């Protein structure tokens, strides 16, 4: 059968493009009508998981209509064009002020010292670079060598810290998280410090487990250590999730600038700050902790702009989204939304803990996310692993990730749920039912799955024998 060429009346799905592969290697020579091009691009993402069923991500997948509208209307604004859009710079400064004050900044200046980033990754990099440069200045002033900087944190670090250490050639010293020490072991962390330690990085909202490192205890131990040694090792808190959770759900807990050695904190505005990606914030305790080498004065389009950041151009829309959320939600609104997330997460945590095949990693929920693993007794005779459960749930549209834990407990397979704005109790009920149905399917298996066979092979090599 011969198809007709397109003409003015051709429907999108009657067009010749819809029976050809989409362009892949070269920019097409000829034009494609806008509505057909739109359909091709749109359909490319059509079979993907619905963002709100993606329980793997920490990043915002729901904003209300006004927030979405503001961001869409600002989609063409480049944040760096301060001369053209001076009010964006003002809004950004106000957001930094609000974030800094939420974290009890002691800085008295009208504009607190901080910076916007694409996410926590950029914010962590900036916090890390500042710590490194401060250490280097101090070493130089003392006439001591400054070629072997190191940084101390737990093995449950987020990958950005590995990037930071590799890019800036800083030795990464990691304290193992273990079943006995599921968060940063403070004594071990202090034992790893020396005169070359640029900072210790505790995490609030550990990506791997959902738990919080004890920054208050770390601060106390570090204060003692710094007094004894004469060092000045500070803390950078990676509060990618916790920075926007603790101030609302646990305002009495000291983890921020209320603690003496916390010199900088980073967070993701696009996680529990409830803005679409990408947005991060970093705040310093005071201007004096932001090394001068990090501020770049650029003469750009006739104005002198001082900029702290790794990027130059970046979208401004997220800043509008953040400022809108601060005004619209207020402390009260953020608290209500996060309380609901905690509530729904707590419900899932209980339901999963009650299933005989599962065991929760921690009894208590500190953040609206948690991990669990196969009950060790059940695991001995199971013909499946959590990777199989992940696949089963994927068939029902959910993305619930299974993964192995970091070094030292890497033979442990866990599964994680991150609850965010947009996950209701009703959706949680659907999820729990789908988990139960999937387990029922897996329990009917006659033979072990491929993933089970691989898992047992690796277990046997370690001398642990499981039998069916
Ligand atoms: C998500 C996360 C990061 C990286 O943040 P992005 O906003 O994705 O760049 C860093 N640290 C922790 C603890 C995180 O959870």
Image: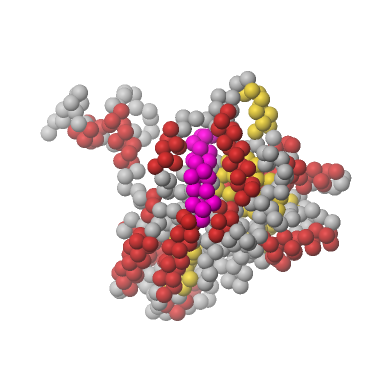
Is residue 7 toward the left or the right of residue 333 in the image? Answer: left
Q: Depth check: give the residue in front, 57 or 381.
A: 57
Q: Which residue lies furthest to the top in this view?
A: 302
Report whether 78 appears left or right of 185. Answer: left
Which quadrant would residue 64 be assigned to in this image? top left
Determine if the magenta segment contains residue 341: no
- The picture places residue 244, in percent across and down from the top left corner, at 55, 52
Q: Is residue 388 left or right of residue 18?
A: right
Residue at image location 83% in from the left, 43% down from the top: 140
Q: Which of the image's four quarters has the C terminus?
A: bottom left
Q: Main secondary structure of the magenta part?
A: helix
Q: Can residue 375 be seen in this view?
A: yes
In this view, the residue in front, 187 or 265, is: 265
Residue at the extreme left of the image, as rendered:
1
For the point 56% across and 44% down, the residue is 280
Quarter occupied by the N terminus: top left
Q: Is residue 221 above or below residue 119?
A: below
Which portion, as a residue range, is magenta? 314-335
Residue 388 appears in the picture as rendered: no
Quadrant housing residue 82: top right
Picture coordinates of residue 195, whole percent (x, y): 80, 54
Residue shown at 52% from the left, 72% from the top: 363
Q: In this view, does 456 lie to the left or right of 439?
A: right
**Near-viewer residue (400 or 67):** 67
């Amino acid at each position: 059968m011969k198809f007709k060429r397109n003409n003015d009346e051709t429907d999108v799905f009657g067009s010749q493009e819809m029976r050809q592969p989409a362009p892949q290697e070269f920019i097409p020579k000829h034009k494609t009508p806008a509505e057909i091009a739109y359909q091709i691009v749109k359909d490319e993402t059509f079979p993907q998981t619905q963002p709100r069923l993606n329980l793997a991500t920490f990043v915002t997948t729901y904003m209300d209509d006004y927030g979405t509208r503001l961001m869409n209307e600002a989609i063409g604004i480049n944040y760096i064009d301060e001369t053209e859009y001076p009010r964006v710079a003002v809004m950004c400064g106000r957001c930094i002020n609000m974030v800094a004050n939420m974290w009890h900044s002691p800085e008295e200046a009208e504009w607190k010292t901080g910076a916007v980033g694409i996410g926590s990754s950029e914010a962590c990099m900036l916090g890390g670079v500042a710590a490194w440069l401060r250490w280097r200045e101090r070493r130089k002033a003392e006439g001591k060598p400054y070629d072997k900087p190191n940084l101390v944190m737990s093995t449950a670090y987020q990958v950005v810290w590995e990037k930071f250490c590799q890019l800036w050639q800083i030795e990464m010293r990691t304290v193992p998280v273990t079943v006995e020490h599921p968060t940063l072991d403070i004594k071990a962390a202090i034992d790893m410090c020396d005169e070359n330690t640029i900072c210790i990085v505790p995490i609030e909202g550990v990506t791997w487990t959902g738990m919080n490192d004890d920054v208050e205890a770390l601060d106390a131990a570090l204060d003692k250590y710094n007094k004894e040694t004469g060092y000045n090792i500070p803390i950078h808190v990676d509060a990618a999730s916790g920075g926007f959770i603790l101030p609302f759900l646990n305002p009495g807990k000291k983890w921020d600038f209320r603690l003496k050695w916390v010199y900088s904190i980073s967070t993701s505005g696009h996680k529990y700050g409830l803005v679409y990606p990408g947005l991060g914030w970093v705040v310093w305790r005071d201007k004096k902790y932001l090394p001068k080498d990090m501020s770049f004065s650029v003469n750009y389009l006739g104005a002198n702009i001082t900029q702290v950041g790794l990027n130059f151009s970046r979208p401004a829309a997220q800043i509008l989204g953040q400022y809108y959320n601060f005004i619209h939600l207020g402390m009260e609104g953020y608290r209500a939304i996060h309380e609901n997330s905690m509530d729904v997460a707590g419900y899932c945590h209980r339901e999963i803990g009650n299933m005989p095949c599962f065991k929760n990693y921690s009894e208590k929920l500190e953040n609206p996310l948690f991990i669990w693993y196969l009950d060790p007794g059940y695991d001995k005779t199971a013909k499946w692993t959590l990777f199989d459960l992940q696949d089963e749930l994927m068939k029902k549209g959910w993305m619930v990730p299974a993964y192995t834990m970091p070094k030292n407990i890497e033979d442990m397979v866990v599964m994680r749920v991150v609850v965010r704005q947009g996950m209701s109790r009703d959706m949680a009920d659907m999820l729990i039912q789908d988990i139960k149905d999937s387990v029922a399917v897996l329990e009917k298996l006659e033979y072990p799955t491929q993933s089970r066979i691989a898992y047992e092979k690796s277990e046997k090599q370690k001398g642990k024998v499981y039998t069916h």
